Amino acid sequence: MTGPSPAERLVDLLNLEEIDLNIFRGRSPHESLQRVFGGQVAGQALVAAGRTVDEERPVHSLHAYFLRPGIPGVPIVYQVERVRDGRSFTTRRVVAVQQGRTIFNLTASFHVREPGFEHQMPMPRVPEPESLPQLADEIRERLGSLPVPLERMARRQAFDLRYVDRLRWSPSELEGVEPRSAVWMRAIGSLGDDPLVHTCALTYASDMTLLDAVRLPVEPLWGPRNFDTASLDHAMWFHRPFRADEWFLYQQESPIATGARGLARGQIFDREGRLIVSVMQEGLFRPHSPERQASPAQQPQGQAATQ
């Protein structure tokens, strides 16, 4: 008898408990990470906001700040403020609280569907996802096998990740590398048919790899880390309906890094080339001493977390 699929576990993670009017509680799984994954908090907060809005008003944007690191294994309470219910737009503010302290806040805007003119930038030409190796397989190919913590994490990973460019493993491979990265993603298994679940699942995934583009010119995507990294803020604009359990391309680039902060922007396209989501995020990059550098087994790639 098999257990739930990774996608089913993600849906369960996003299924918040309503404990009072406008107050929800979310699980925070026990993980080997030092902090709660930032995408989890953002996804759960958006679920809380969406639960207070009519279904005919999908979310069109969110703006959020990561204020304190979340503690794995400790429930998170999401308090929703109903800021505005207009004729076309609805606004919600969400505060995430853990052990009496605010760790995250989010403002989300919802908009009734309206007709209008259209244009978009084209999707870049990249290989099809089926022609690229799964992230875990690419790591196994290099290391021979996955370290036990990563093998466990790979089995629970909710998304299939396939990088367009092969991972770089050493500083010698970084010469001339531009601050850009692209990765195909899709949830591993069905997420059901609730559009809010797909929106919040993609919000979860949007924090997994976006800061890769900032790091690329200075350290490999895999291997010992030279920086303590944390997500500072996060913004998303949702342009079209989509399914997060179908392939989408996450194109990422970093226009600037300075003052221990790096800015990353992302464009998410569906397989037909339609731009479905735009993303912006700033991250903290503090250099640390060599003795604090973590081994690959301690620093799994693609695990951005709150500061």
Image (tube, grey):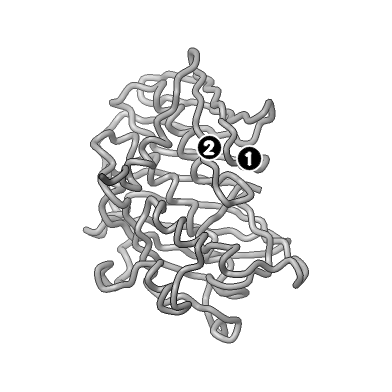
Q: Is residue 250 left or right of residue 233?
A: left
Q: Residues within 10 Å of mark 2 (few under 14, many from 20)?
A: some
**Image-quadrant location for residue 97:** top right
Q: Which residue is mark 1?
A: 71
Q: Amino acid at mark 2?
A: Ser
Left or right of residue 76: residue 249: left
Helix, strand or loop at mark 1: loop
Give the amino acid type for the residue marked by disc 1 in the picture: Ile
| Residue in the picture at 31% in, 46% down | 5
Name the residue at 28% across, 26% down. 56
Q: Earlier in the sequence, mark 2 or mark 1?
A: 2
**Viewport quadrant of the N terminus:** top left
Q: Is residue 245 above or below residue 161?
A: above
Judging depth in this view, the residue of 302 and 126 nearest the camera is 302
Circle 2 residue? 28
Report the side of 100 relative to 271 (left or right): right
Q: Residue 134: x, y in percent? A: 35, 67
297, above or below 74, in the image: below
Query: What is the C-alpha distance between the residues marked 2 and 1?
Result: 8 Å
Residue 6 numbered tag: none
| Spot occupied by residue 193 in the image (x, y as percentages of width and height) | 23, 36
| Discs 2, 1 touching: Cβ within 8 Å | yes
* Picture layout, residue 76 above or below residue 218: above
Locate residue 160, reporting x and y percent: 35, 58
